[in-house]
Amino acid sequence: MFVDSHCHLDCIKLDEFDDDYHVLIQRCLDAGVEHMLCVSIDMHKYPRMLEQAANHPQVSVSAGVHPMAKQEEDVDAETLKEIASNQKVVAIGETGLDYYYNKGDKNWQQERFRTHIQCAVELDKPVIVHTRDAGKDTLDILKEENAEKCGGVIHCFTETMDFAEKALELGFMISFSGIITFRNADALREVASQVPDSHLLIETDSPYLAPAPFRGKQNYPAHVKHVAQKLADIRNTSIEHIAEISKDNFYRLFDPC
């Protein structure tokens, strides 16, 4: 049985699931996915996301604003702490830095990141980190805000082994997505071969980044097994072993109800 440590169930188009969220969840369960962490990216969508997950013990949620969300969609610390008090919320984020698209003022994005980490530390909940073209600043802010006190995960990992080692020193886990199945991802596969078993997670980031052989199609948590199989191939082990260690790591980090 698998755990999808990072997905956006509320963003999945339901037309291929009989326009029914319950059918989507059942398809995932039938595919061997026993738990899914639905990750928040937008406060406007958060109430609906929570409502959808409420009656599904197999779905946990996070609370946060994506670094690429517009500046006016920010959330203050008190509001973030309030919504994160719900028992379904097991993590803060996703948060972090994305300089790929943001070529202007980076201060507001950094402050948003700091606010999320501070809340995570105060609430003793792990933080889910997104980083793109911002490796040094991401690590610097994690250290400056004492993120080792709350721990967390670098999700959809695409950084170097040097970055991974520094994140591991802070106690963070490393999560791999369908990107490791992409043809041009040799450098990432090399990193994926070296991350310790004790700090490895798998994810879909669905509905995005569908793994081979589903490139170009909508992704959903059932496809996490393809990430697990690719990791097993890379690490010369079995898919069952990847499923087991990633599941154990997930429950140890997030502790869902």
Image: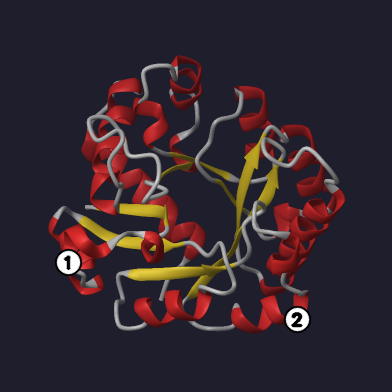
Across and down, in percent, residue 237 comes to 27, 26
Residue 167 left/right relative to 179: right
Front in this rendered view, residue 233 or 50: 50
Image-quadrant location for residue 113: bottom right
The dot on residue 78 is 2
Count of numbered circles in the view = 2
At x 36% / y 18%, what residue is drawn?
183
- Mark 2 or mark 1, which has the lower sequence index? 1
Quadrant of the snapshot with the C terminus: bottom left
At x 60% / y 61%, what residue is drawn?
93
SS for callout 1? helix
Across and down, in percent, residue 202 comes to 39, 43
Front in this rendered view, residue 224 or 120: 224
Across and down, in percent, residue 104 comes to 82, 42
Work out how far the residue at label 2 is from the one at label 1, CA to CA, in angstroms.
35 Å
Q: Amino acid at mark 1?
A: Gln
Q: Amino acid at mark 2?
A: Glu
69 lies above or below 80: above
Residue that mark 1 sits on: 26
